Image: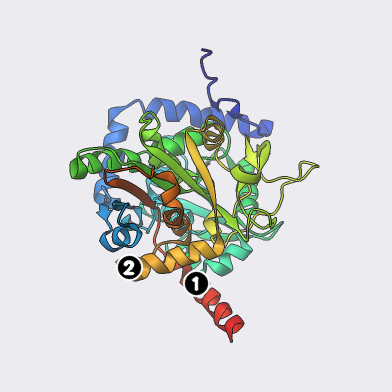
């Protein structure tokens, strides 16, 4: 078998960037390989995970959710990996901490980032404040309106939040603006990309800083149940929380892995963000992967009720896993995600992020993944990637629409 090319996942990934960024990426790649080979780096990062972020996050057996989906011939145990209990309210802090420690060692004085739902922006602004670094966050103007609480948090933390007003004014356009900034300022600036997207080494680096999710889950489920789970599900936009959860389980063939994309108003509607389910291969933000594009290769507008999933591309490793069949990717529509949001809130007293609600909606499809003659208890783990405080206005607005339409 041919040895995989560095920076590639099969034929996905790579570095499709302007010449002006090549030296910055080379510097980053060398720094990542050098420092992550040192025990001292991981000792410092793990201390921040533990004492600053609050890891390990709990693996919670959700009793009422398990009872709701169990039946006479279907015994379920549904666990939630509580990444929402991290400092800043989502898994994004795992990666932000890892990258800011690299940036400090590289001598950078300024941090930039893109954000969609604002969770990555808040995490980046948080670590920049802690390490006393200048911070600039690019965010689509539309996303700034629907995630106003996180915009306020970022500014409280001392970050400058700059609206991206081109295109659809969402995450894709925020990425474009952040890349332009980095091209102009790479000497003193580090760009903390928030997902497993972008040119090499970002997909590998972000995955490695997020794999703590899956490693903890594996240890915790063995302690609690004495065996691995049967099914693990996570939402996929760019795909960082899913990749962090899935990666330690890829070689465990008995564990089914399911990624849930945003199907928006339906996969046939043209208003969705399901790059793996309906996209085609192409280049976006420096990497070759599946993406939403028209016949002329122009990027198509993505849509999701969830700002964090409202992106027309996906990480290249997910593209490889789709083609190999190791991970099954499904679409979840906006209304199904909203129903799952309300259900978890009422059954377990946990308000999930709308991104995470897409993973929870998978439970409605669960029976088709379990053999009818299954006699043993089925163990399911859902990665609860973030909390839903930021989405309250969106959910309230949707409820208002429903009441209005029903009146």
Which one is in front, 72 or 257?
72
Separation of marks 2 and 1 at Cα, in angstroms: 17 Å
From the viewer's perspective, is residue 131 above or below residue 326?
below
Residue 266 occupies quadrant:
bottom right
On the image, the x and y values in percent for residue 344 come to: 37, 65
Q: Which residue is mark 2?
A: 347
For the question of whether residue 363 can be seen, the reply is yes
Give the numbered dot on residue 336: none
* Residue most extreme to the right: 296
* Residue most extreme to the top: 1
Which one is in front, 219 or 174?
219
Q: Secondary structure at mark 1?
A: helix
On the image, the x and y values in percent for residue 127 come to: 39, 51
Colouring convention used in this rendered image of the protein:
rainbow
For the question of whether residue 103 can be seen, the reply is no
For the C terminus, give its image quadrant.
Answer: bottom right
In the image, is 393 to the left or to the right of 91?
right
Which one is in front, 393 or 285?
393
Q: Secondary structure at mark 2?
A: helix
Which one is in front, 25 or 8?
8
In the image, is 303 to the left or to the right of 387?
right
């Amino acid at each position: 078998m041919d040895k995989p090319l560095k920076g590639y996942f099969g034929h996905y990934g790579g570095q499709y960037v302007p010449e002006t960024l090549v030296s910055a990426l080379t510097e980053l790649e060398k720094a990542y390989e050098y420092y992550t080979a040192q025990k001292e780096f991981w000792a410092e990062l793990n201390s921040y995970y533990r004492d600053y972020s609050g890891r390990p996050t709990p693996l919670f057996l959700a009793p009422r959710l398990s009872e709701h989906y169990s039946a006479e011939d279907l015994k379920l145990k549904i666990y939630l990996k509580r990444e929402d209990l991290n400092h800043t309210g989502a898994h994004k802090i795992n990666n932000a901490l890892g990258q800011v420690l690299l940036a400090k060692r590289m001598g950078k004085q300024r941090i930039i980032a893109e954000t969609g739902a604002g969770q990555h922006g808040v995490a980046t602004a948080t670590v920049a404040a802690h390490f006393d670094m200048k911070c600039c966050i690019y965010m689509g103007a539309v996303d700034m309106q629907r995630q106003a609480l996180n915009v306020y948090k970022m500014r409280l933390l001392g970050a400058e939040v700059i609206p991206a007003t081109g295109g659809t004014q969402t995450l894709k356009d925020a990425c474009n603006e952040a890349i332009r900034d980095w091209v102009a300022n790479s000497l003193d600036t580090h760009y903390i990309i928030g997902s497993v997207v972008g040119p090499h080494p970002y997909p590998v680096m972000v995955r490695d800083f997020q794999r703590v999710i899956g490693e903890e889950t594996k240890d915790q489920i063995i302690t609690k149940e004495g065996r691995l789970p049967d099914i693990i599900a996570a939402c996929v936009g760019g795909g960082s929380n899913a990749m962090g959860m899935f990666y330690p389980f890829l070689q465990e063939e008995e564990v089914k892995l399911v990624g849930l994309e945003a199907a928006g108003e339906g996969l046939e509607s043209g208003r969705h963000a399901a790059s793996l389910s309906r996209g085609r291969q192409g280049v976006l933000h420096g990497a070759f992967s599946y993406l939403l594009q028209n016949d002329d290769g122009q990027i198509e507008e993505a849509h999701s009720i969830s700002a964090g999933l409202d992106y027309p591309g996906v990480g290249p490793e997910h593209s490889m896993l789709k083609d190999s069949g190791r991970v099954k990717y499904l679409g979840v529509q906006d209304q199904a995600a909203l129903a799952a949001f309300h259900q978890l809130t009422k059954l377990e007293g946990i308000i999930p992020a709308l991104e995470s609600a897409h993973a929870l909606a998978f439970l409605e499809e669960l029976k088709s993944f379990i053999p009818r003659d299954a006699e043993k208890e089925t163990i399911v783990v859902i990665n609860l990637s973030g909390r839903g405080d930021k989405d309250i206005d969106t959910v309230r607005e949707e409820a208002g629409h429903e009441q209005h339409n029903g009146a």
